[in-house]
Amino acid sequence: MAKYFKFDTKQIRFVKYNNDRTALQFVDPVDGPLCIASVNIPEVPLKDDEIIIKNYSENEGVLEDLISNNIVEELHTVPCGFTEATICKLLVNPDDYK
């Protein structure tokens, strides 16, 4: 369970990074952005339906919430600075979350 904010699938928004990869953020309708749950690592190859999830620091627990709500499927981890991030397959259509 997300440790630092209340997880709500209604707050999910998909946007694009500058390199056209998918980013996942949580946005409260009143308070605005809560967090960016993804990370962009340009040197890591991704398929079009894959995303890298940041499940550490202020995002701790968000991966488990995304999996249990059938938003993503965990594939494997990749190095990300001094820690790791998780490559996931998107199980939803980002266009449905606008």
Image: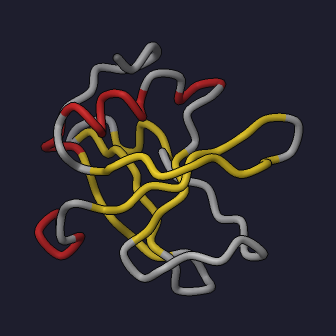
Front residue of 33 and 96: 96
Q: Quadrant of residue 46?
A: bottom right
Q: Which residue is drawn at 29% across and 38% down?
A: 67
Position above or below: 69 against 4:
below
Q: How many marks?
A: 0
Residue in view at x 47 percent, y 63 percent: 51
Specify whether 46 is left or right of 37.
right
| Relative to 50, residue 5 above or below | above
94 with respect to 4 (left or right):
left
> In the picture shown, does residue 6 fall above or below 82?
above
The quadrant in which the C terminus is found is: bottom left
Quarter-wise, where is residue 5 in the image? top left
Residue occupying image coordinates x 62% and y 28%: 56
Residue drawn where x is 23% and y is 49% of the image: 71
Left or right of 90 on screen, residue 29: left
- Measuring from the top left, give residue 41's x and y in whole percent: 71, 65
Q: Which residue lies furthest to the right in this view?
A: 82
| Residue 77 horizontal/vertical position (percent) | 63, 47
Q: Where is residue 96? Give x, y as percent.
A: 11, 69
Q: How is the image coloured?
A: secondary structure
**Residue 26 place in picture, x, y as percent:** 34, 44
**Left/right of residue 12 with respect to residue 57 in the rendered view:** left
Looking at the picture, does residue 54 appear above or below residue 38?
Answer: above
Quadrant containing the N terminus is top left
